Amino acid sequence: MEGRTPAQSASTVTPVMQLVHANSAGFIHGGEIMKLVDTTAGVASMRHCNGRVVTVEVDSLTFLAPVHIGELVTLNAVDTQAWRSSMEVEVDVWREDPRTGDREQTTTAYLTMVAVDARGRPVPVPPLNADTEDDVRRQRAADVRREERIRIRKRIEDEARS
Ligand SMILES: CC(C)(COP(=O)(O)OP(=O)(O)OC[C@H]1O[C@@H](n2cnc3c(N)ncnc32)[C@H](O)[C@@H]1OP(=O)(O)O)[C@@H](O)C(=O)NCCC(=O)NCCS
C-alpha cells in the first residue's frame, strides 16, 4: 500500500459559531467544539486511507480558552501516525475575533480513528510517510501515546481480573 504524507491529508474547517451553539454563560458549548473536533479528525483520516473511518478513542481533549458567539473557529487536523488499521489525528482549534483579528488556540485533542469496511470491520491503512522534522516529532510522540494507552488499558484489565 502506497504511503502518504501528513500534508496530503491535513484538513482545515472554519465554521462561524452562532447563538444556537452557545451555553447559558454565552460561550460556545464544549460539546459543539468536540463534535467539530471529531468531524475534522474524520476528514483527515478519511483522506489518509481513502475509506470509511470510525472514532475509537479521544485522548486528552483539553480546553485552553473559551470561544464566544460570533467568533470564527478554525480547526486544523493532521494525521500524526498510522499503524495497522488505526490512525492518530491531532486537532488544534483556534478562535478568532473577526473585528480585531485576535487569534488564540482554544483546544488540542488527539483522536484514534480506525479504517473499517462496509461491515464495520477494521481494514489496513497506508503508512504515514514523515516528510518534515515536525512530522517525525509528531510520529514519535504518537507512538509514545499509543504505548501509554495500551499500557493503561492492560493495567485496568489486570486490576479488574485480580
Ligand atoms: C473501532 C472498532 C472497529 C475496533 O474493533 P476491534 O474489534 O477492537 O478491532 P481490533 O481489536 O482489530 O482493533 C482495531 C484497531 O483499533 C485499535 N483500537 C481498538 N480499541 C482501541 C482503543 N480503545 N483505543 C485506541 N485504539 C484502539 C487497535 O489498537 C487496532 O489498531 P491497529 O490495527 O492499528 O493495531 C470497534 O471497536 C468499533 O466499531 N467501535 C465503535 C466505533 C464507533 O461507533 N465510533 C463512534 C461513531 S464514529
Image (cartoon, rainbow, N blue to C red):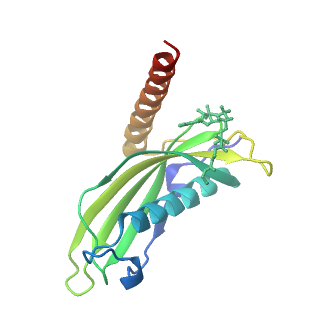
> Can residue 41 be seen?
yes
Q: How many marks?
A: 0
- Judging depth in this view, the residue of 115 and 139 nearest the camera is 115
**In which quarter of the view is residue 15 placed?**
bottom left
Figure check: 131 above or below 148: below
Figure check: 139 above or below 35: above
Figure check: 126 above or below 149: below
Image quarter hosting the N terminus = top right
Q: Residue 102: percent from the left, percent from the top?
A: 20, 76
Q: Is residue 149 left or right of residue 2?
A: left
Quarter, ligand 1: top right
At a point 37% along the width and 38% down the height, the residue shown is: 137
Q: Is residue 82 left or right of residue 138?
A: right
At a point 80% along the width and 52% down the height, the residue shown is: 118
Figure check: 102 above or below 99: above
- Judging depth in this view, the residue of 35 and 114 nearest the camera is 35
Q: Residue 9: percent from the left, percent from the top?
A: 55, 57
Q: Residue 84: percent from the left, percent from the top?
A: 64, 34
- Judging depth in this view, the residue of 54 and 98 nearest the camera is 54
> Can residue 128 be seen?
no
Q: Residue 29: percent from the left, percent from the top?
A: 36, 69
At a point 40% along the width and 77% down the height, the residue shown is: 21
The extreme top residue here reads: 162
The extreme bottom residue here reads: 99
- Judging depth in this view, the residue of 155 and 58 nearest the camera is 155
At a point 71% along the width and 54% down the height, the residue shown is: 51
The extreme right residue here reads: 119
